[in-house]
Amino acid sequence: DAGVIQSPRHEVTEMGQEVTLRCKPISGHDYLFWYRQTMMRGLELLIYFNNNVPIDDSGMPEDRFSAKMPNASFSTLKIQPSEPRDSAVYFCASSLSSDTQYFGPGTRLTVL
Amino acid sequence: QKEVEQNSGPLSVPEGAIASLNCTYSDRGSQSFFWYRQYSGKSPELIMSIYSNGDKEDGRFTAQLNKASQYVSLLIRDSQPSDSATYLCAVNTFGSSASKIIFGSGTRLSIRP
């Protein structure tokens, strides 16, 4: 299995631009998670889906962030408009249950 | 109070010694506990999970759980330089609508030759 796939691996953009991060979970996994990691705040859960349905989005920082999962093999996390404080590494993870999670390689986002 | 607390370190341990990493959590209803290892610039990878009180051993790693004290630890025997990484404790906790995994901020471990 290829594991969790994320794209792009690096993204540099200017403040105000729209950013879209993509994730392909491990085939057969029915849970998908989006995390953000910074030195200051550590690893934070933003949102998670079960069978393509958002279950808990209480970690989404504000309305500028949105996430979708149109089918079992694809999810996006969108930031519009982006701000410098959004600079972080964004991880996608998937699991067969809500417990043991397998992480993708992450997307390093820099907003100038 | 944070839901999952770890000492940020760095914890420096000589090669060959036992490294002991600790974690406390606040939700008494938590049932699942995990240790992830994260190398610099890489993603977290699961190394141990534990669900029952007591010890669970896997190779050089031992996870210990004490639900009464809300405490989980990870022991690494015969520490190797390749064990140098940040170790994240994760606990499932129950919110108002669903359970979710909460991560601690991690302990940075350095194994010195």
Image (cartoon, rainbow, N blue to C red):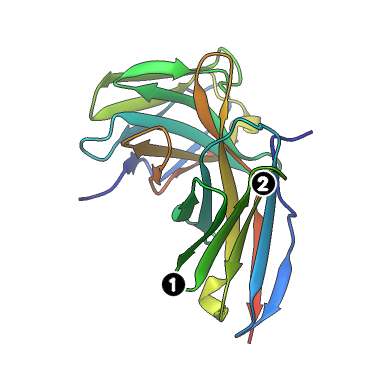
Determine which quarter of the picture holds residue B85.
bottom right
For the residue labelled by badge 2, is the local secondary structure a helix, a strand or a loop? loop
Res. B72 visible in picture: yes
Q: Residue at x 31, y 36 (%)?
A: A96
Q: What number is the disc on residue B59?
A: 1
Of A38 and B66, nearer the camera is B66
Q: Residue at x 52, y 62 (%)?
A: B39
Q: Chain of mark 1?
A: B
Of B14 and B42, nearer the camera is B14
Residue that badge 2 annotates: B105
Q: What number is the disc on residue A9?
A: none
Q: Amino acid at mark 1?
A: Gly
Packing grade of label 2 (10 A; few <14, some 14-19, many >=20) is many
Give how far apart the Cα atoms at labels 2 and 1 are. Answer: 25 Å
Q: Amino acid at mark 2?
A: Ser
Tell me: residue A3, above or below residue A33: below
**In the image, is A47 to the left or to the right of B104?**
left
- Which residue is most to the right? B1
Q: Residue at x 79, y 33 (%)?
A: B1
Of A56 and A91, nearer the camera is A56
Q: Chain of mark 2?
A: B
